[in-house]
Each structure stands twice: as C-alpha cells, then as structure tokens.
Image: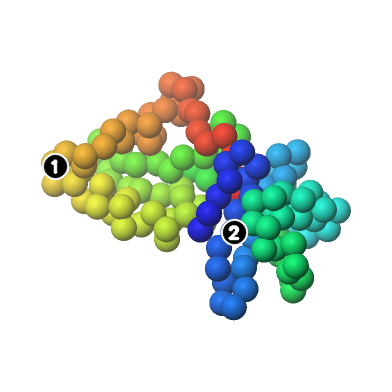
C-alpha cells in the first residue's frame, strides 16, 4: 500500500488491477456511503501525477465507506492502548489488520512488563481527559 500523505491519494495492487482512492478534505463527518462521482476528477488528476500508468486505465467500479476511530473528535485518529490493570488495543479502523502483528507484540510486552521498544504514551487513553489529543494530518 502506498499513501501520499500530502494529498491522501493511496493505491495498492488488487488482483489483476489497482485499487486507488483519495480522501476528500472538504467532506465533513457523515454516515453517507454514497459514491461522490463529482469528486472523481480531483482523484484522477492526482492519480495520474502520482502513478502515471493510471492515465491509460479505466475504472471498473467504486465504493465509499466509513472510518471508525477511538474518539469522535476530528483531532485524534490514533488507536487506544491500555489503562492501569486493563489491557486493550483497539480503534485502528481499517488499519487494524495491517498493524495487528506489531500492535499485538507491543501489548504483549506491556502485559508482561517488558519494554516494548517504543514510546506508547501518545496512545494512552488518558489523553482524552487531558484534552491534548492530536493525531494524523490526514486519514484515508
């Protein structure tokens, strides 16, 4: 999977083709899963700049979906990890499967008292009480 964080354009191989898309920075929070065909020209413009081979491609189908995060606040899209005496690791939305090997290893280290090898404080659930929740610039 390749993600261009400047534009949110992403793509990866999907069978014999390429799955690609891009988040609409102007779209607000909604439960609408209707494909926004009027957004397609913007996606195509970025797509052919980032992956020129797509200029000769055709689009076979489209879909729209929802992204779920730990918090409903737009400023925080990071997963949550642990509370004293309670171990959890969730809130990855569609990235859970992608991150599960590393996330599982970190959680296992925390459970048995080992150093996980990285600072997990940005994922602490207490960040919501402190109102210092910040997260990714763009989510696709």
Depth check: give the residue in front, 60 or 70: 60
Q: Earlier in the sequence, mark 2 or mark 1?
A: 2
Depth check: give the residue in front, 20 or 68: 20
Q: Quadrant of residue 139?
A: top right
Residue 98 location (% of width, % of height) = 42, 58
Whether the residues at callouts 2 and 1 have beta carbons within 8 Å, the answer is no
Label 2 CA crowd tier, 10 Å (few <14, some 14–19, many 20+):
some
Q: Residue furthest bottom?
A: 16
For residue 136, say whether it is visible.
yes
Residue drawn at (61%, 38%), measured in percent from left and top? Answer: 6
Q: Secondary structure at mark 1?
A: loop
Residue drawn at (46%, 48%), measured in percent from left and top? Answer: 91
Q: Which mark is residue 11?
A: 2
- Disc 2/disc 1 C-alpha distance (Å): 36 Å
Judge whether 131 appears above or below 70 on screen: above
Judge whether 134 appears above or below 53 on screen: above
Q: Residue furthest right?
A: 38
Label 1 CA crowd tier, 10 Å (few <14, some 14–19, many 20+):
few
Residue drawn at (14%, 42%), measured in percent from left and top? Answer: 114
Residue designated by label 1: 114
Q: Secondary structure at mark 2?
A: strand
Residue 39 location (% of width, % of height) = 81, 51
- Give the total of numbered labels: 2
Depth check: give the residue in front, 113 or 39: 39
Residue drawn at (19%, 46%), measured in percent from left and top? Answer: 109
Q: Which numbered disc, 2 or 1, marks the residue closer to the eye?
A: 2
For residue 36, say whether it is visible.
no
Residue 53 location (% of width, % of height) = 67, 63
Residue 32 location (% of width, % of height) = 75, 54
């Amino acid at each position: 999977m390749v993600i261009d964080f400047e534009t949110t354009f992403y793509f990866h191989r999907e069978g014999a083709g390429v799955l690609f898309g891009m988040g609409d920075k102007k779209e607000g929070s909604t439960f609408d899963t209707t494909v926004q065909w009027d957004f397609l020209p913007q996606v195509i413009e970025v797509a052919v700049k980032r992956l020129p081979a797509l200029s000769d491609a055709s689009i076979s189908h489209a879909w729209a979906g929802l992204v779920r995060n730990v918090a409903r606040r737009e400023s925080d899209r990071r997963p949550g990890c642990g509370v004293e005496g309670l171990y959890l690791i969730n809130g990855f939305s569609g990235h859970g499967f992608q991150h599960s090997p590393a996330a599982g290893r970190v959680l296992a280290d925390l459970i048995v008292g080992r150093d996980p090898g990285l600072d997990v404080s940005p994922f602490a659930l207490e960040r919501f009480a402190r109102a210092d929740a910040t997260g990714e610039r763009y989510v696709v």
